[in-house]
Image (spheres, rainbow, N blue to C red):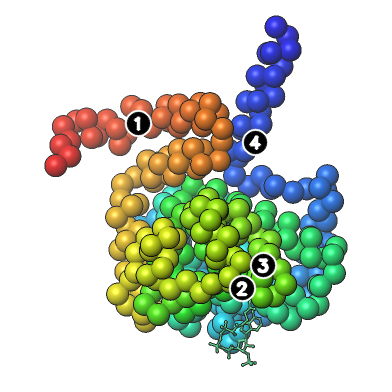
Amino acid sequence: MAISLWKNVLQTTKERILQQRGVSLYNSAHGYEEEAIKKKLQQFAGGSITLSKEDDGIGILTLNNPKLMNAFTGTMMLELQERVSELENWKDGKGLIICGAGNTFCSGSDLNVVKAIANSQDGMNMCMFMQNTLTRLMRLPLISVALVQGKAFGGGAELTTACDFRLMAPGSEMRFVHKRMGLVPGWGGAARLVAIVGHRAALRLLSGATGVDPEMARRLGLSEETLESSDGSGALEEARAWLGRHTEGPASVVRAVKEVVAAGRELPLEAALRTEKDIFGRVWGGPANLEALARRAKHK
Ligand SMILES: CCC(=O)SCCNC(=O)CCNC(=O)[C@H](O)C(C)(C)COP(=O)(O)OP(=O)(O)OC[C@H]1O[C@@H](n2cnc3c(N)ncnc32)[C@H](O)[C@@H]1OP(=O)(O)O
């Protein structure tokens, strides 16, 4: 009796921890040295990650390093972590679009950084740092879209898989180039790709370092839609309109929708069901629910 009670408490605590945003996958118990890798990444400056939080509850996160096809410098990795913390605290947020400056998405890690930290200790720390950040990004209670223009290569392709959806502009390309670099994805991109396209397609894309155009991405279920516009502002407007259709309504409800799906994706069935019950309890009889009942909403 006492043992089963204890097991239940442990299980519930584990579920709560999983659900908590901002909780990192890795800590010092895993040999992760966060302060050491932050200090190292700080030495490789350049580019920036900007976040604009709009009144309609949509955030626009822009990778800015167009000189290097928006490759991730060390300081950009640090800034991404800061922006994710900011988004975790944005209670009015409903959606997020991630895009790159200069009509291209991101060419992965800055190869100058890769060269400089090509030793096991730094590599593992950088890998854990980016997995922590991208897992927190994936778990945000915001519906997220990667707007792929130009190239999304290497870590850039991995970043797109941390979003709920991908929209591709005409002529754009995603490519997991890691194998050609003697690598495998390390930012969580392989695990997420398998979840999105299945293990056979993921193996094909990784083992062939295959370029994926918008049509192939649609066929694989990697992209939701091919946009009409290939220029920066036109594509962004289309992405906003697309996301706007999924983020219509009060933030409390949109965020709850994302949360039940995230629980279903990440938790074992019973834990997911319990989480769904808790989230249901938050919206049931809430202002949006009462308002819909009062207006006798019909769904034609
Ligand atoms: C997490 C693991 C990883 O992400 S490993 C890194 C994986 N990424 C790569 O290997 C990408 C290497 N780059 C490329 O294949 C090409 O530059 C791509 C992205 C196809 C773009 O080609 P293209 O349109 O012809 O432009 P370009 O080659 O002239 O590039 C413009 C300038 O940007 C630079 N650049 C590009 N990508 C990176 C990168 N990842 N790190 C550092 N620099 C990069 C290019 O070297 C070029 O610079 P420069 O004008 O020659 O000084």
Disc 3 crowd rating (10 Å Cα; few below 14, some 14-19, many 20+) is many
Q: Secondary structure at mark 4?
A: helix
Report which residue position mark 2 lands on: 177
Which label's residue is closer to the chain start, 4 or 2?
Answer: 4
Which label's residue is closer to the chain start, 3 or 1?
Answer: 3
Residue drawn at x 59%, y 44% is 21
Q: Residue furthest top?
A: 1
Q: Quadrant of residue 300?
A: top left
Q: Is residue 162 something one can see in this rendering?
A: no
Calculate the distance from the C-alpha at mark 3 to the C-alpha at mark 1. 39 Å
Q: Judge left or right: residue 161 versus residue 249.
A: right
Which label's residue is closer to the chain start, 3 or 4?
Answer: 4
Three-letter amino acid code at disc 3?
A: Met
Tally of numbered tags? 4
Q: Judge left or right: residue 209 versus residue 223.
A: right
Three-letter amino acid code at disc 4?
A: Ile
Report which residue position mark 1 lands on: 286
Which mark is on residue 262?
Answer: none
Calculate the distance from the C-alpha at mark 1 to the C-alpha at mark 4. 26 Å
Q: Is residue 102 above or below residue 105?
A: below
Residue drawn at x 56%, y 32% is 268
Q: Nearer the viewer, residue 91 or 108?
A: 108
Which label's residue is closer to the chain start, 1 or 2?
Answer: 2
Disc 2 crowd rating (10 Å Cα; few below 14, some 14-19, many 20+) is many
Q: Secondary structure at mark 2?
A: loop
Q: Nearer the viewer, mark 1 or mark 4?
A: 4
Which mark is on residue 77?
Answer: 3
Which label's residue is closer to the chain start, 1 or 4?
Answer: 4
Q: Secondary structure at mark 3?
A: helix
